[in-house]
Amino acid sequence: MMKFSNTLIYWYLKNNRDLPWRKTKNPYFIWLSEIMLQQTRVAQGMAYYLKFTATFPTVFELAKADESTVLKMWQGLGYYSRARNLHFSAKQIANEFNGEFPSTYKEIIKLKGIGDYTASAIASICFNESTAVVDGNVYRVLSRYFGINTPINSTAGIKEFKVLAQSLIDKTQPGTFNQAIMDFGALHCKPQNPLCETCPFSGSCVALEKKLTRELPVKEKKIKVKKRYFNFLVIKTNDNKTILSERKGKGIWQGLYQFPLIESDKTINKNELISSDEFIDLFPSETTISLFNQKEIVHKLSHQHLCTQFWVIETEKSSTIQIKWSDIEKYPVPILIANFLEAYQHKK
């Protein structure tokens, strides 16, 4: 086992990536980077990390910001509950712990939005605690090297890989070991086309020997993707105002803003839209309506596909329609709406 960690760390010291959060042991910065890089590639997350740390150099600044500002800065990264939990925990650290980040795995994992992986990363990198990280990269490296076909998204698999990773960790430098195995999975033992010819483990890797690199790791079939049909009503009054409202409830995009939305059970045409009760309630008087995107936009989320149409509705000014078009960019919106706004402004 010692040989595995030595080989891995030796590879890492020669090949590691030059990343800004690698130059610090500050738990606030490590936490930010870990939360941002969940479900986000390093190349995309880097710009957000730099902008975030410049705007909120300490946990106190992040805690003081209002949620709308945090969500606006997160716009485009997706999975917005990450940002809301980050903000919630920042306020807790600033107000209840005087800005002192908890220093043990047991305490760190109690923070909202922090699971086993992030708690292990922070505890090992910042506080030298011997807790192994297990993420997609680690599953891939371990399942291939040891030839394990237990599904990585099963309860048994999650437990088995955690125990295995924990048995391999170098207790003298747990943070380095964890970063090494993550980088090795990201750069060398890649999902497609792993670099087996130049791999330091090629002499003892079960997947390479048995030609199983394509089959491992094993994942149980995911849940069925649900299709939803969204019709956004993009209102434009003759005095250049519109309606945007905040999404409430626990669904997707909580805390982000959107145009009035009519959800239908299939793709609908203009006549079906204007004869719906929801449309008549919103626009009792005369309007001009046109479909902005001739081809339906399909926005893919992890468990649902949103088949979206943007309807531009020109109408008279009204006391209930208050938001100026010139102010729209101040509001945090889902990337689906941000992309529409860019195309719409461009077309004008």
Image (spheres, rainbow, N blue to C red):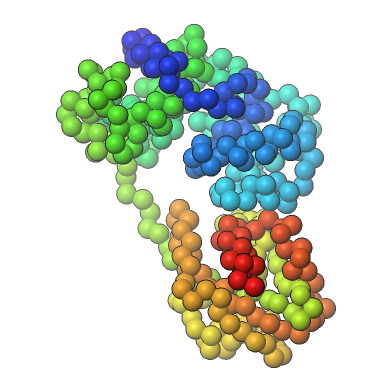
Tell me the residue at 59%/33% (across/down): 33
Place residue 282 in its image quadrant.
Answer: bottom right
Tell me the residue at 48%/67% (across/down): 297
Work out which residue is located at the far right of the displayed protein and give it: 319
Q: Is residue 151 visible?
A: no
Report the front residue among 132 and 324: 324
- The image shows residue 180, relative to residue 155, as above or below, that is above
237 relative position to 36: left or right: right
156 relative position to 247: left or right: left
- The image shows residue 170, relative to residue 274, as above or below, that is above
Q: Quadrant of the C terminus?
A: bottom right
Place residue 34 in its image quadrant.
Answer: top right
Q: Quadrant of the N terminus?
A: top left
254 relative position to 169: left or right: right
Q: How many marks?
A: 0
Work out which residue is located at the far bottom of the displayed protein and give it: 286
Tell me the residue at 41%/35% (across/down): 136
Q: Is residue 202 visible?
A: yes
Q: Position of residue 155 (x, y in %)?
A: 38, 37
Q: Position of residue 160 (x, y in %)?
A: 35, 28
Q: Position of residue 170 (x, y in %)?
A: 44, 12
Tell me the residue at 68%/51% (across/down): 72
Place residue 6 in its image quadrant.
Answer: top left
332 relative position to 184: left or right: right
Report the front residue among 202 and 320: 202
Q: Position of residue 248 (x, y in %)?
A: 66, 60
